[in-house]
Amino acid sequence: MEDIPRDIIEKAAKGEMEAFEAIYKAASGFVYRTALRIVNNSSDAQEVTQDIFMKIYDNLKYFEFRSNLKTWVYRITVNTAINAYRRNLREKNRRQDFDSVIETEGHSPELIQAAERSDAEKQITSLLNMLTPEHKAVIILREIEGLSYEDIAQSLKININTVRSRLKRAREALLELSKKAVKNGL
């Protein structure tokens, strides 16, 4: 996400749509990619992205410049995406009995093509989905988005040592899960 000048942020906070559009253009790619990696579904990620920008629009007037806008957007993105992931998981669990009775159709052609194109990405996504949402968030922010420990701590509103310990546990969990996958021939 590129840096946004303070005057643009201030104008957007006052409701100027052109200024908010500039913020949207600068942040939308990051917001969508992060949401997609957390919720693991394109349509859910699009919905979460819309929710995030509604939150940004509604709350930008409260932004106090104590951190940079990038950190503030990261925090909103991760928290909103984790909440959506948990909500979807609860709904999925409620539907599980119903789905076991009804025979489901095969995967869509788009999903099959995506799986064939990038088997490694599929395996990584599968492993990431086995992590807790907190571990998944720190891994995505550090390893995929390239944020520093300080930026992750600010984004998630946690201590930097908590970031380090979560990353360590998440990496250990990924290593263990990948060993099991190899052992089981997955």
Image (cartoon, helix red, strand yellow):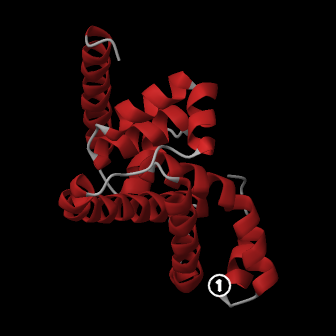
Q: Residue at x 50, y 43 (%)?
A: 107
Q: Residue at x 72, y 53 (%)?
A: 2
Height in image: 161 above or below 154? Answer: above
Left or right side of 53 for 2: right
Height in image: 163 above or below 84? Answer: above
Q: From this viewpoint, is residue 5 visible?
A: no
Quadrant (top left, top right, bottom left, bottom right) of the C terminus = top left
State the residue lying farthest toward the right. Answer: 18
Of the residues shown, which amino acid type is indicated by label 1? Ala
Please name the residue that numbered disc 1 is placed on. 13
Q: Residue at x 78, y 70 (%)?
A: 22
The crowding category of the residue bearing disc 1, from other C-alpha atoms within 10 Å (few below 14, some 14 to 19, many at least 20), is many
User: Residue 62, image x and y in percent?
Assistant: 51, 83
Nearest the viewer among 58 and 46 is: 46
How many numbered circles does the render carry? 1
Nearest the viewer among 149 and 129 is: 129
User: Residue 133, image x and y in percent?
Assistant: 30, 48
Nearest the viewer among 37 and 1 is: 37
Left or right side of 51 for 28: right
Q: Residue at x 32, y 18 (%)?
A: 178
Say what secondary structure mark 1 lies in: helix
